[in-house]
Structure formats: C-alpha cells, structure tokens
Amino acid sequence: MKKALAALCCLAAVMNPAAQALGAEKADLILHNGKVLTVDDAFHIASAVAVRDGKIVATGGEEIVGEYSAPETVDLGGRTLMPGFIDTHVHMMSMSFRQIDMDGVKSIADIQQRIRAKAEKLGPGEWITGFGWDEALLSEKRVPLRADLDAAAPDNPVVLTRAGGHSSVGNSMALKIAGIDRDTPDPERGVIEHLANGDPNGVIRERSDLYRKHVPKDDWEDLRPTFIASIRKLLSLGITSFHNATANLDDEPVGKGGIADPGPGLTWRRLNGIYDELGDELPRVTTYIAYPGPERLKAFPHRSGDGTIQVRLGGIGESPVDGGFTGPAAWLLTEYRGMDGFTGKSNYTDEALFAMADDAARNGWQMALHAIGDAAIVQTVNAYHHALTTVQGPGRQGKDRRWFLDHFTIMPPRETMQTMAEDGIMISQQPNFLYNLEARYEAWLDPYRLAHNNSVATPAGMGIHVAFASDNLPIGPMVGLYAAISRKGPSGRVHGIEEAVSREDAIRMYTANGAYLSWEEGIKGTLEPGKLADMIVLDHDPLTVPIDKLMDVKVDMTFVGGKLVYRRGADD
C-alpha cells in the first residue's frame, strides 16, 4: 500500500518551477491553479495552498508558487480544492465470511442469487447474513420477505439487515431457531410483522438481536481486515474525518442487546491498534462509545475529547432513544398517518434516560444519543437539560460539553429547540435521509412533519449548531449536500423549501461544523494556516455545478495531513 501511495504522489506531482527561487520559503507540497474553498468565516476563495509538516502554511493566489518552494507541486487545472468532509455519524462495517455483499443489488432476484451462491459455498445448516438492503432501491419496490429467502436457501438460516440497521428479515429456518411463530408477542421495543394469515413474514423491527444472537460469533482478527477496508473506502468519498457510531470501551460486549449493538468486536483498544499501525493512511476518527453502566464509566481513565489527532473518544451513543423510519418505529407526538393509534415508542423510561445523562455529566462525558421522532427529541432534550443544568462534572472545558442529538429527523416544538439553543445542545443531522426515505415520509407523515423532516434552516436559524453526517444511507456526502440545498427527494418533489440552506452553509456543515463536535475546530475543518492539510480535489465546483448534477460530482484526490491517500482511477 505504501509503495502504491508513493507512486501516486509521483504521478500527481511535477517539479515546482520556483523550487530554485532565491529566498523562497520551504514547503512540502503546493497545490495551485484551482478554486480553493477555504471555508473560513468569510468563506474566502483562493487559488493556491502551501503545505508543510502536514499543515497549511499559506493560502492565496498564484503568488504562492513564487513565495514557496516544494518538492511536489500539483496543478489543479481549474478543479476545486476544499476541506475534506467530516461525517459525524457513520457505522464502519466489517464483513464476516458468512455475509453476502449487498453492493450493487438492484432487485430481490439479485439478493436471492447471492444467497444461493453463499449457501452453495457454506453448505446446509450454516447461517447466512447480510447488511444494507433498501426496498426503495430494489426494482420490486418492496421489502424482501421470508418466502423470498426460503426460495433461495431453504436449508440455511438467513438473516438480512436493512440499511440503517433498524429492521431485519429472516427466513423460515431463522424464525424457527429464534423461536418465533404466529403466537409470539411483540418483544419489548420491537415489532414482529405478520402476513394476512397471521404467520410472521420474517421482518422484525428494532430487535434484530432476536435473530443475530443465534449467529455464531466471528473472531476479531478475521473481521479486522474488512473493517479497515471499510474505513479506507471513506477516502474515495472525500471523507477525511468521521465519527464512528458503534464501539465499546472494553473487548467484551456491553450494553443492552438490540438497543445499542456495538458491532462485531470493535473497541477503544482495537481501534487504537488499527491507527497505531495504519493511521497515516486512513481518515481520522472520533468514536462513540456504548454506555457501559455507571461503575465502568467512572473507572475508565479517559473521557470524551481525549486521544490524538488520529483517533479520539467522542460521545456516549448511539443508544437509540427510539426507532427509525425504516421500521417504522420512530416515536412521534402524533399518530402515523394511516396507522390508527400508532405513534412509536421510547426505548427508555424517563428515569432511565435521566440517570444515564446525569451519569455522563457527572463523569465528564459528551452525550450523542439517537433521537428521530419529535417525541423522542423532547424526551432526550429534557434529560440533557436536567443533566447540563443541575449536575456538576469536570466537563472538557468547564461547561463546554458539546452534547448533541443524532438524527433530529422530525422537528420538535419550538420550545424544545429554544432549550437546545440555550443549553448549547447541537445536532448531527443526516439531510440525505430526506432523499433516501422520501417514500416512507410521504406515506406516514402529516403535511407539516413531511415539510420539516430532517430540518436544517429552522434549528440553525435559532442558534443551534448543526453538523452533517450520513448514517450509511448512503455514506456519500454529495447526497446530503444535494438534499440540504434542494430539499428534493428522488421523485423531484420539494419538501419544505424553507428548510433549505445555501451551498456555502451546507458545505460548512459538512466540514467546519463537524470539527466543532469533537473540540477540533482549531485544528481542522477549514483550509487556513496552522490547520491540518486534510483536503480533497473535486472534478466540479460544488458552488456552481447545476444542482441536479451535484450528486455526480467526483472526488479526484484526497489528502490527509498533506499526504495523498486516494487518487481516482488509481485506487478504484
């Protein structure tokens, strides 16, 4: 890998014509003849950047080429250079030998073909798993069901989890192993779906653990290479920093099954091990931690914000307060349209949620809880408010605790947002949800909630700090930018144009604002002197490309600390 990257750097560089210029200040890398979006407070536009020791030393015009000498100079040829994206909520996935690859599936028939191939390879009786199906992207435009999986692998238990992780579908053998039949009551916090004849159709919402606890565990060392590969893939999307949404403090899993699945073995120690070995080749990471309980939290020697420029601790999360709209199971203040009496529900009593928030405050931890429905947001903000205003703790910088909500999908009452603004409670928002879940929002939400789904402009206008993320639906930032700016779904319909933001603000929310969530605004998120040279080169300018072409913009190069770590065509 290192040899390949070195070769790429050579391909990207030409000798600086000013390298021999008398009196020129030394740099390691110069990029020029482009449009440089610094994303500083004034959103200053430059055309050249000089880098030394992994940091920006100067931005400006073509005079940079004469003022600095460097062994490598990149002629941008008019392309756009900007800060790398910071995705503040993404789940890095490892891949088991028993897992089918969902990339590129376009139909249930495609899924069946991949299941058949895996069943033939593994043999009868072995579990087959998968992650990432999305009925909106399938030609049948429906959820895969038990019968579909039975037809592909009648002699293997099969469980496939939806993109987003809030629902899974199993076949007949998986249902039998899980002990689920037509008489099984809905589990706590979850829903078992049924066919018209009363038999389960294979789909379980919010409680995938009912299936997955029966799947044999994989060894971490077997999973580690695919986990690293999933991190490395972020570079091709222009993501130079991310918040990993699932990890544990300790190597043994902790927490409640089905509420916060910390993933297949990722822990604080193991993540540090990866970055000790490969950190200069990967995007920087801040990791959420599943709540381990009061005793372990108090005993742990570190807290949110601790770490290095490569890997650090983030908030306690994701710990969903409610479900998602892929279920549906988000908790609303009103009933779902067409679903008499159904509002979703909380995963926590007020007592339990307040206790966890108070414990985090007492021990100096940030909170980063999943709250999607407006009722869940109200409950979570109430718990945050109590902890932030009544519980004394070390905090990272006095009272600068930077607690935030993940998702904030259904805009809550104004008084709740006023409390957020007063307490400094922030949002990690996924504007791409508007695009990818459009059909579900249209089916289940009243006109007001539909218009304000995944709101950005209103909370930002009230003084609430908003940073962008993707939550794997999908991970590409361009979809989020498109939805935040246009408020369009795949149908082309506009949902609540009053929630749209400018291109400049959307870019800032996907770069500089993300750095703030991890107390790193002083070192990254913008291309200013003294900050890390985490940069991307785009083939088109996101400020001027026609809005309907924005999702087609490609990342040509990605630099982390001034080092070329991805080049389109060479690493694809």
Image (spheres, rainbow, N blue to C red):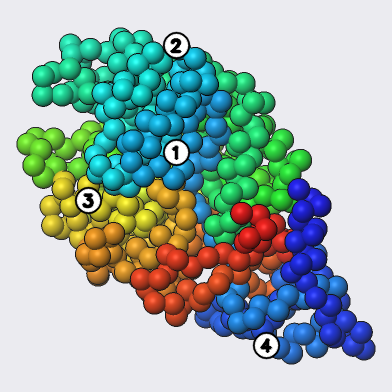
Sort mark 2 into few (<14), some (14-19) or many (20+) by Cα contacts within 10 Å: some
Side (left or right) of 275 relative to 23: left
Q: Which amino acid type corresponds to the residue marked 3 in the rendered image?
A: Ala
Secondary-structure class at tag 4: loop
Comparing 381 with 125, the one in front is: 125
Secondary-structure class at tag 3: helix
Q: Nearer the viewer, mark 4 or mark 3?
A: 3
Residue 175 sits in quarter: top left
Q: Earlier in the sequence, mark 2 or mark 4?
A: 4
Q: Earlier in the sequence, mark 1 or mark 4?
A: 4
Q: Which amino acid type corresponds to the residue marked 1 in the rendered image?
A: Met
- CA distance separating discs 1 and 2: 21 Å
Secondary-structure class at tag 1: loop
Q: Earlier in the sequence, mark 4 or mark 3?
A: 4
| Residue of label 4 | 61
- CA distance separating discs 1 and 3: 21 Å
Residue 508 visible in the current orientation:
yes
- Rendered image: mark on residue 102: 1
Sort mark 3 into few (<14), some (14-19) or many (20+) by Cα contacts within 10 Å: some
Residue 207 visible in the current orientation:
no
Q: Residue at x 67, y 26 (%)?
A: 221
- Rendered image: mark on residue 439: 3
